[in-house]
Image (cartoon, rainbow, N blue to C red):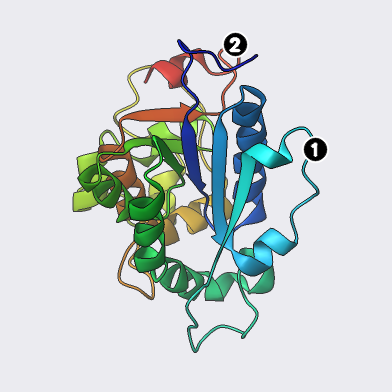
Amino acid sequence: MAITDDHKQLHVAMFPWLAFSHIIPFLELSKSIAQKEHRVSLLSAARNIQRFPILPPNLSPLINLVKLTLPRVKELPSNAESTMDVSTDDIPYLKRAFDGLQPEVTRFLKDESPDWIIYDFAPYWFPSVAAGLGISRVFFSIINAWFIAFQGPSPDDLINGSDDRRIAKDFLAPPKWVPFPSKLCYRKHEANWMVGCVSVNAYEVSDAYRSGMVLKGSDCLFIIHCYEFEPQWLTL
């Protein structure tokens, strides 16, 4: 597909969370966008980019891998730049370091002025920064529709903490706002993990708050889904 006068080449920036289970879907989406001959800038910590697979030669001129300097946090190992470098207990500190990228990422947006920015659940501060610069905003959820529906009935509920689920038992049944019969629920170990998501972490920001802010501040949502598998959840 060639770029013509009536098909403007866009510049799309990508900002995934510091986990390769998130980074790889963003990288694959970057390739798909580059195949349409649009420019892509994928931002991540420098050590993560060094671990990326080699880009296809026909796409590499269109994909700019932007190395960010992850701020040091004393609770983390000196070379920790992704979840694979830390224990589960240390992930909140990795989120603190991730939030420290705000000044550097803001400078990139001001200097490069991308047409679109596609980001993950973690940078709760990012949509307002991009909106202030007039950049169109997309939350790319790498997790399917039912998970988002389980999180809360609205972004405001996630932001305000008005969800009354507080213990693991509360997550062992579908939430009360699901309007159709369903046996879908978390397993016990997953329910324990969800309790952590709605709790304030080491940086005093819960994952629920992060998700609520990016959902509320986005122009649209990209989601990996299978309509035949979860039609009701996708609609919800």
* Residue furthest out toward the front: 5
Q: Badge 1 is on which residue?
A: 56
Dot label at residue 228: 2
Residue 64 % position (x, y): 61, 48
Judging from the image, what secondary structure is the residue with disc 1 in?
Answer: loop
| Label 1, label 2: how far apart the Cα atoms are | 32 Å
Q: Is residue 46 visible?
A: yes
Q: Amino acid at mark 2?
A: Glu
Where does the N terminus fall, quadrant-wise?
Answer: top right
User: Observer-nearest residue: 157 or 31?
Assistant: 31
Q: Is residue 142 visible?
A: no
User: How many C-alpha atoms fall within 10 Å of the one at disc 2: few (<14), some, or many (≥20)?
Assistant: few
Q: Which quadrant of the view contains residue 229?
A: top right
Residue 192 % position (x, y): 50, 58
**For the residues carrying marks 1 and 2, which lies nearer the camera in this image?**
1
Q: Amino acid at mark 1?
A: Pro
Residue 112 % position (x, y): 41, 49
Where does the C terminus fall, quadrant-wise?
Answer: top left
Judging from the image, what secondary structure is the residue with disc 2 in?
Answer: loop
User: Observer-nearest residue: 158 or 56?
Assistant: 56
User: Observer-nearest residue: 222 or 7?
Assistant: 7
Q: How many marks?
A: 2
* Residue furthest out toward the bottom: 74
